[in-house]
Image (cartoon, rainbow, N blue to C red):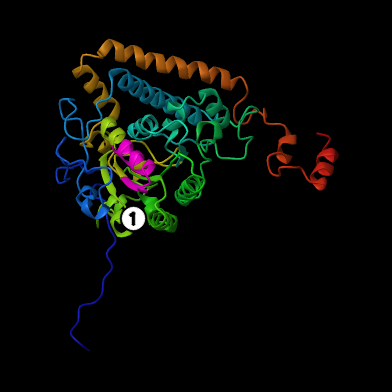
């Protein structure tokens, strides 16, 4: 036999397991304000460094510095902060509702609120969003009624989806929010296709889509990148790298080998890596990518570097695979606290106004919850009419369905 070593297989392992002390000291983080901002028409090959650095605007003192500072007015910043507070209050109340048996399933976005909320403000109201299941902040920022969200979560008679989706898989054409799919990754090529159609028609609307770090290992991610690059589709492709899929860390999807943003380089896409807990950085990167798309310069891939503080869903127990205090040790902090600090540094906010805004969010959620529960919760048999099962499938109901509906007497 030849003197060769036996082959071995590497299985990536997370740095911290339950019982370990979280240590992020080796994490490479760009200083706020140090990453350059290229011109909108910069060639992707001339900005590959941005896929490995980290766009940041807010420094440790809450000051907005550097070329990416979008210089938002105080009122926009306050609205953004209040929307993040409302999103978190909504999440907390719906999580408790699931634990109380009032709904079957829920997914929180705690620690990631800056991504959907800042992007909602940076995009035009008529741009089309193809979200994953942790972008409820998009709907809330665009004014979708909390009661309607709760009606769907409670699977009651007023469920706008009529019981045809999981509780948190919202859909609202009027709010530019494409139906969430449980088949992860499908929204990426759908967004690219929608954007291609918009360009083909000579429209002025762009699309944006979101996936998690784990979903980048799915074929849909790569199909979307190919079409987006080849046809210069006016779309923003967002990867929310929150470090964890349902129970596997980002390294299983290749996060230890390179950044997720760097995957855009091979497709010839401009790629940005952004501090996902920095409201201003997320806004600025989205604004840059949107302007590029509207200028017929094509798609942009953005990796939002953040952390999933809570479990993947109410079906997940993160204490089984990571330290309980890992989220508190995350070096990029809490997006709500960071934006609050920025507003305080501007003299546009204080602890009392923050407490009042938090209470206002809680009161708004409580009022919406009372109204939604009046229509029923899970198990109370207050369901949409049986007649609705025949609706919304065909533009014109065929004869055999009309007969079946008549036979049911509905």
Magenta-drawn stretch contains 81: no
In this rendered view, identify the residue nearer to me: 153 or 404. Answer: 404
Residue visible at 79% across and 46% down? Answer: 398
The image shows residue 228 at horizontal and vertical percentages of: 40, 53
Please report the bounds of the magenta region as a residue range: 285-302
Nearer to me, 76 or 145: 76
**Image quadrant where residue 313 sits:** top left
Q: Nearer the viewer, residue 52 or 70?
A: 70
Classify residue 134 as left or right of residue 76: right
Residue underneath mark 1:
253
Q: Is residue 251 above or below residue 152?
A: below
Q: In screen coordinates, is 406 left or right of 88? A: right
The question of residue 292 being in magenta is answered with yes
Residue 94 in percent (x, y) is at 47, 28
- State which quadrant residue 333 falls in: top left
Tally the marks: 1
Q: Residue 66: x and y, percent?
A: 16, 33
Residue at 20% across, 17% down: 346
């Amino acid at each position: 036999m030849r003197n060769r070593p036996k082959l071995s297989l590497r299985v990536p392992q997370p740095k911290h397991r339950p019982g370990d002390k979280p240590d992020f000291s080796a994490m490479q983080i760009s200083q706020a304000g140090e990453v350059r901002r290229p011109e909108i028409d910069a060639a992707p090959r001339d900005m590959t460094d941005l896929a490995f650095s980290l766009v940041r605007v807010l420094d440790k003192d809450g000051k907005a510095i550097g070329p990416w500072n979008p210089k938002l007015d105080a009122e926009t910043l306050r609205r953004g902060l209040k929307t993040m507070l409302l999103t978190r209050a909504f999440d907390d109340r719906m999580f408790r509702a699931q634990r109380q048996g009032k709904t079957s399933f829920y997914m929180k976005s705690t620690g990631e609120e800056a991504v959907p909320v800042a992007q909602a403000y940076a995009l035009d109201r008529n741009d089309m969003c193809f979200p994953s299941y942790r972008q409820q902040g998009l709907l809330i920022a665009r004014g979708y009624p909390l009661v309607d969200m709760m009606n769907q979560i409670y699977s009651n008679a007023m469920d706008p989806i009529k019981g045809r989706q999981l509780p948190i898989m919202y859909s609202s054409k009027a709010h530019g929010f494409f139906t969430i799919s449980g088949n992860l990754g499908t929204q990426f090529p759908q967004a690219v296709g929608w954007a291609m159609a918009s360009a083909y028609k000579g429209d002025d609307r762009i699309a944006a889509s979101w996936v998690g770090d784990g979903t980048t290992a799915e074929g849909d991610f790569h199909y979307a990148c190919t079409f987006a690059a080849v046809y210069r589709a006016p779309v923003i492709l967002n990867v929310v790298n929150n470090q964890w899929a349902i129970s596997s860390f980002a390294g299983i999807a290749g996060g230890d080998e390179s950044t997720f943003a760097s995957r855009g380089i091979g497709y010839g896409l401009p790629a940005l890596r952004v501090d996902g807990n920095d409201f201003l950085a997320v806004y600025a990167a989205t604004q840059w990518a949107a302007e590029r798309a509207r200028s017929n310069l094509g798609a942009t891939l953005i990796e939002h570097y953040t952390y999933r503080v809570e479990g993947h869903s109410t079906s997940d127990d993160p204490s089984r695979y990571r330290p309980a205090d890992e989220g508190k040790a995350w070096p990029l902090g809490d997006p709500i606290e960071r934006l609050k600090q920025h507003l305080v540094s501007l003299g546009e906010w204080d602890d009392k106004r923050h407490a009042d805004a938090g209470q206002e969010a809680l009161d708004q959620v409580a009022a919406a919850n009372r109204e939604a529960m009046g229509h029923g919760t899970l198990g109370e048999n207050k369901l949409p009419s049986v007649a609705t099962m025949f609706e919304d499938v065909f533009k014109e109901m065929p004869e055999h369905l009309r007969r079946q509906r008549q036979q049911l007497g509905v």
